[in-house]
Structure formats: C-alpha cells, structure tokens
Amino acid sequence: MAPVKTAIVLCAGRGKRLSPHTDTTPKPLLRVGQKPTLDFIFTALESAGIEKIVLVTHYLADQIEAYAKAQTFFATEQVVCVAQNALSGTADAALAALDAKPEWFDSAFLLTASDYLVPQSFYKDLLQRYIEHDKTIAVSLKRIATAEMAMRSSVRFDEHGDVLEVVEKPAPGSAPSALSANLVYVLPSDIVEHIRAVPLSPRGEREIQTAVNTYLKNHGPGCSLEQPVPSEWHPDMR
C-alpha cells in the first residue's frame, strides 16, 4: 500500500458559533497563545509524512492564503489554496480541491477539518492504522456522551469491528454505537466519482459522509481508530 502523502484541509467555514471572535479572523487562524490553530494541524501533518496540502478556503480567504505563504512547515509550492465558491458542504469543498490538483490525488489522501487542536501524533496514528488494516477507508473516531449523538454522528460496525456506516445525527435512542466520527478520514482516490454524485441535503449542502457511506456499501467496510477527543478553540485559550 502506497504511503499517504497528500491532505485536504477544510478551511472555508464561517465559524458563526464563535462570533465575534470570527468576525474578523477565520476560525482556523484563531490563536492559542502565540500559535494559530492551523499550526497544530500543520505540525501534525508534517509528523505524519504528508508532503502536499490543499487548503479549501472561502470566508476571509485572503487571510488563509497569507498564512499558506508565510508558514514554515512545508515548501511554498507544496501548499496551495483553492476557493470553494459557496459554503455548500464538505463534499463540495473536497471536490474543489480534487478538481484543482487532480495530479496530487492518484492515490489515497487525508481529509481533515481545520478547527481541531490536534496533538502531534494525531494523523500519524490514523495513517498507521490505515496501513496496518489494509482497508480502503480509515475513520478517526471519538467517544462522546449519548446525549450528544443527536447533534453529531454515530458509527455502525460489523461483527469484526470494521466500519459499515457513519450515521449522521441519529434519532434519540437509535445510535448504533457510542463512537462518533471526527471530520478526519483517509480516503481512496477512486472515491471521487461518489463525491461528485452526492446529492443536496435538505439544508442545501453536499456532505462527505454520504460519499463515504456509498463507498463503504459498494467496496466493503473500512477501519477506524478511536482517538482522544480533539480540542476546539474557545476564548479562554487566548
């Protein structure tokens, strides 16, 4: 199995829940001490052996682009910014990256949210699980309280503990497990056709979990890794 060398980092969102802090600063650049959140992402991607990164931008995109040019983790040509024209979901965002740099995605790649304050080994550990289990998809998991499931997701497993489905916002009492999916996946290159086929949700968004579930159904279960719940920025961290 070829090593994973490319990552898509989703940086387009408005971050409304953190207003007024995000009124003038995009969520991925909110600071923890002297470091923007993206520094934590880049440190962990570098540790995992990632060599090429596509940052998907929209809200306050110029600030993300300036960060990409100024960061010192990777050579400038290894980090590109691609605009998502509208905030129409994570599948749409991923497709913007895949279409902009198709030559970077001829093998499996990492897809991650950008608002997690991940520890340095976070992506490395997930990629190691992916390599060890020889599955086409790897899912990062977190254990959360049952009461939170209806606002997040729950993962359905087969009898061997492999991932069958990511169930978004399950109805109370219907969650198939106590584990929720982080927005962090290792995905195969041929998932692109499934991403293109993702329909609009009732909210008018195209979500990557739909493509993941279709791929799992058609190609067999994926592997997973339960990881510590990644922290997210809050004002007390400044």
Image (cartoon, helix red, strand yellow):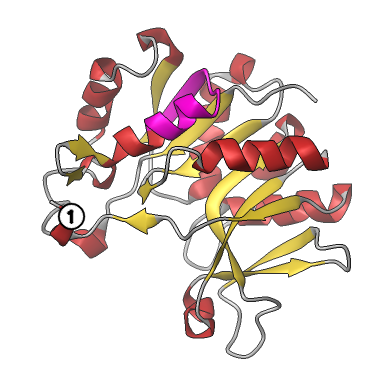
- Whether residue 207 is visible, yes or no, is yes
Question: Which quadrant of the structure image shows residue 55?
Answer: top left
Residue at screen point 51% across, 21% down: 100
Q: Is residue 66 left or right of residue 221?
A: left
Name which residue type carries label 1: Met
Side (left or right) of 1 relative to 94: right
Q: Please tell me in which quadrant of the rendered image residue 193 appears.
A: top right
Residue located at (78% from left, 38% from top) = 132
Residue 143, how many percent across, how many down? 55, 69
Q: Is residue 157 above or below residue 114?
A: below
Question: Which range of residues does the magenta coloring cover?
Answer: 42-55
Q: Is residue 193 visible?
A: no
**Front-most of residues 204 and 89:** 89
When the figure is inspected, residue 234 is found, relative to residue 83, above or below; the finding is: below
Location of mark 1 (residue): 237
Q: Nearer the viewer, residue 64 or 39?
A: 39
Q: Please identify the quadrant where the N terminus is shown.
A: top right
Left or right relative to 210: residue 118: left
Q: Residue at x 83, y 38 (%)?
A: 134
Residue 111 vs 143, above or below: the answer is: above
